[in-house]
């Protein structure tokens, strides 16, 4: 199968606006160099739907995309929904697999069924938040003490780093990002390696900018929605320097123009830089596939309910 040449990195928002748009980095790979072409801002979810739709012309030649949103949920939470969740959920989820080995030949069923059932039951992201709140308040017997915000295996797969739980719907609303984002990836019939087989030329992965940022900066903060400091500016400069020099375990270098470099460093919210970090992870998957990996660098077997973060 020919690999699409266009690479995308998506910094996602569950409720994009002019103040907080979706940020999309475009690029291409030549050997171990990822060249950044441009960074776009999309102010609505409809704009993303249009861009990745099967009939879309701008990406007619296909793409490989890294998305900063979870592709799955913690399996104990989903198991509780399946066994005795509210309303129609037990019926909707009754034949969902319990583990990755329950359905090795058809994991697409789980990823699609889960997000579609949640939309059918919850209606909107406020309903999904209510569902998670009830999990924390009433299902005490079904979860370990103090574990309202369960994590997936992949969230803590890299020692010393942890991504936010997909059950977090406040502050950083990662759960709402799953609810809105995953539905649109399935609706556009994208292939999500290890989870579902869709269009052969439209491939998406769960990415996490914090993996590369943490590798290069440790605990140093490089972004803030409200507090632009000199320390964070220096951290962004150091991060971009490291990406350009290829000082990551991915073995890839980022190619930027001086103007692009200035734009990445000057963004105190870090949205542009996060999109580029997702682009680098998508480029790594693209490279791994070129080197012969049928899984694009992912583990051979992925829990169809939880998913897996690329490069974790």
Image (spheres, helix red, strand yellow):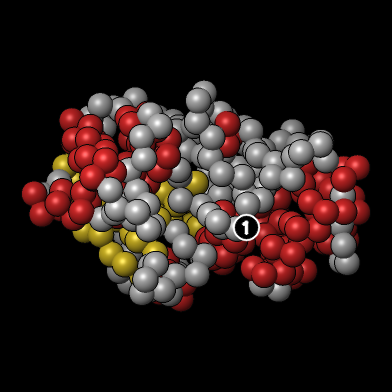
Front residue of this view, candidates 113 and 230: 230
Q: Residue at x 87, y 45 (%)?
A: 140
Please tell me which residue is depicted at 8% across the width and 49% down the height of the picture. Answer: 258
The image quarter containing residue 129 is bottom right
Q: Is residue 107 left or right of residue 265?
A: right
Where residue 196 appears, as percent x and y from the top left, is 59, 50
Along the horizontal axis of the image, is 273 left or right of 154? Answer: left
In this rendering, the answer to whether 51 lies above or below 73 is below
Say which residue label 1 marks: 169
Residue 165 in view here:
yes
Task: Please tell me which residue is depicted at 56% across the width and 44% down the height of the picture.
Answer: 164
**Horizontal relation, residue 68 to residue 196: left or right:** left
Quarter occupied by the N terminus: top left
Question: Can you say whether 240 is above or below 22 in the image?
Answer: above
Nearest the camera: 270 or 191? 270
Name above or below for residue 217 compared with residue 193: above
Residue 125 quadrant: bottom right
Q: Residue at x 45, y 52 (%)?
A: 67
Closest to the observer, 141 or 53: 141
Numbered disc 1: secondary structure: loop
| Residue 257 rendering spot, x and y as whole percentages | 10, 49
Q: Residue furthest left?
A: 258
Q: Is residue 125 above or below residue 218?
A: below
In depth, the one of 285 and 173 nearer the eye is 173
Residue 93 seen: no
Number of numbered tags placed on the structure image: 1
Mark 1 surroundings within 10 Å by alpha-carbon count, few (fewer than 14), some (14 through 19), many (20 or more):
many
Q: Position of residue 126 (x, y in %)?
A: 67, 70
Q: Seen in the image, is 254 located left or right of residue 116?
A: left
């Amino acid at each position: 199968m020919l690999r699409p040449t266009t690479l995308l990195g998506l910094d996602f928002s569950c409720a994009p606006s002019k103040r907080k748009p979706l940020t999309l980095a475009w690029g291409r790979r030549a050997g171990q160099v990822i060249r950044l072409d441009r960074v776009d801002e999309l102010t609505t979810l409809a704009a993303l739907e249009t861009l990745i739709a099967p009939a879309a012309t701008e990406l007619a030649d296909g793409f490989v995309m890294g998305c900063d949103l979870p592709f799955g949920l913690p399996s104990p939470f989903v198991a509780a929904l399946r066994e005795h969740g509210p309303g129609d959920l037990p019926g909707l989820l009754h034949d969902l697999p319990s583990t990755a080995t329950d359905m090795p030949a058809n994991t697409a069923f789980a990823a699609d069924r889960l997000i579609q059932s949640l939309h059918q039951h919850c209606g909107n992201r406020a309903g999904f938040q209510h569902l998670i709140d009830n999990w924390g308040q009433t299902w005490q017997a079904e979860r370990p003490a103090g574990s309202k915000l369960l994590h997936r295996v992949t969230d803590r797969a890299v020692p010393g780093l942890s991504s936010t739980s997909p059950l977090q719907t406040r502050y950083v609303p990662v759960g709402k990002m799953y609810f809105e984002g995953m539905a649109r990836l399935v609706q556009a019939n994208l292939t999500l390696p290890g989870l579902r087989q869709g269009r052969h030329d439209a491939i998406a992965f769960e990415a996490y900018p914090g993996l590369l940022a943490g590798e290069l900066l440790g605990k140093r903060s490089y972004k803030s929605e409200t507090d632009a400091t000199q320390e964070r500016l220096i951290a962004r400069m150091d991060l971009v320097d490291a990406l350009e020099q290829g000082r990551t375990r991915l073995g890839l270098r980022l190619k930027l123009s001086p103007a692009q470099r200035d734009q990445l460093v000057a963004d105190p919210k870090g949205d542009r830089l996060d999109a580029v970090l997702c682009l680098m992870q998508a480029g790594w998957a693209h490279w791994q596939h070129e080197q012969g990996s049928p899984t694009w660098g992912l583990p051979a077997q992925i829990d169809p309910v939880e998913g897996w973060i690329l490069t974790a």
